[in-house]
Image (tube, rainbow, N blue to C red):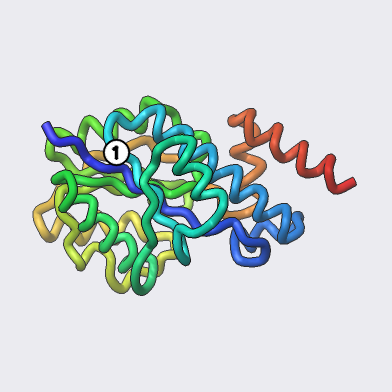
Amino acid sequence: MKSPNLILFAKQPIPGEVKTRLQRDYTAEQAAEIAAFLVFRTVELAVNSWPSEVYLYGAPDANHPLFRELAADYRVHLATQAGGDLGDRMMRALREGVARSGAAGIMGCDVPQCRWEIIERAHEQLAKGHNVIGPTVDGGYYFIGMQAAPRVLFEKIDWGGPNVANVTLERAQRLGMYFEQLPELRDIDTVEDLWIVAQEYEPLRRQLYRILAGSR
């Protein structure tokens, strides 16, 4: 059995540079505060659910106070997302993870409602030598785990579009690769996503109330 790495992808929670689509209803500072909360909760979930090493890959780099604090408190390893568009960065990170432990998974920090059972299932399947994908409601994916990272699965994809997961799976099928699928989740991109997830995930709901109360 392998001991696959889990790689968390996160942007530095800098006002005006993160969660910009939330700024319809929130200030840039509030959007950054929400982003920081999502990163914190994702790291907390990961280290409590993933049986092997967890890495936090930051963008544009890992030199942010929140990331350093999480590394110290939760013993996650810090690294920088290197090179190109999102596809390039994911491919490089996965290849680094595979080189370290024979398999690796990448998870975004936009699904705080993800249950620990889902994380454990992803680890179990990867450890057995399977590939794993966790689709999102909007057509993307919140998790992808692999034994190898072929370039064709990550190049020339409209990462903000509605067919990311389908295109990835179609290309994988042509390569003879099979993916175990995790439950579909809603990732948080828009204000609507934020409040829908908050209805089922109480810690986020409480955080939003605190943010709104602080703005009055």
Outermost residue toward the front in this view: 72
- Please state which of residues 26 and 89 is positioned toward the viewer in this rendering: 89
Circle 1: element type:
loop
Q: Residue at x 19, y 44 (%)?
A: 131
Q: Residue at x 29, y 58 (%)?
A: 93
Q: What residue is disc 1 on? A: 53
Q: How many numbered discs sit on the rendered protein? A: 1
Quadrant for residue 75, please give it: top left
- Please state which of residues 143 and 105 is positioned toward the viewer in this rendering: 105
| Residue 188 in the image, given as x and y percentages of width and height | 56, 49
- Please state which of residues 164 and 117 is positioned toward the viewer in this rendering: 117
Q: Residue at x 60, y 50 (%)?
A: 35
The amino acid type, in three-letter code, at marker 1 is: Glu
| Residue 195 in the image, given as x and y percentages of width and height | 66, 42
Mark 1: few/some/many CA within 10 Å (<14, 14-19, 20+) = some
Position of residue 18 relative to residue 204, above or below, is below
Q: Residue at x 48, y 47 (%)?
A: 109
Quadrant for residue 206, please give it: top right
Outermost residue toward the right in this view: 216
Q: Is residue 24 left or right of residue 138?
A: right
Position of residue 94 relative to residue 152, above or below, is above
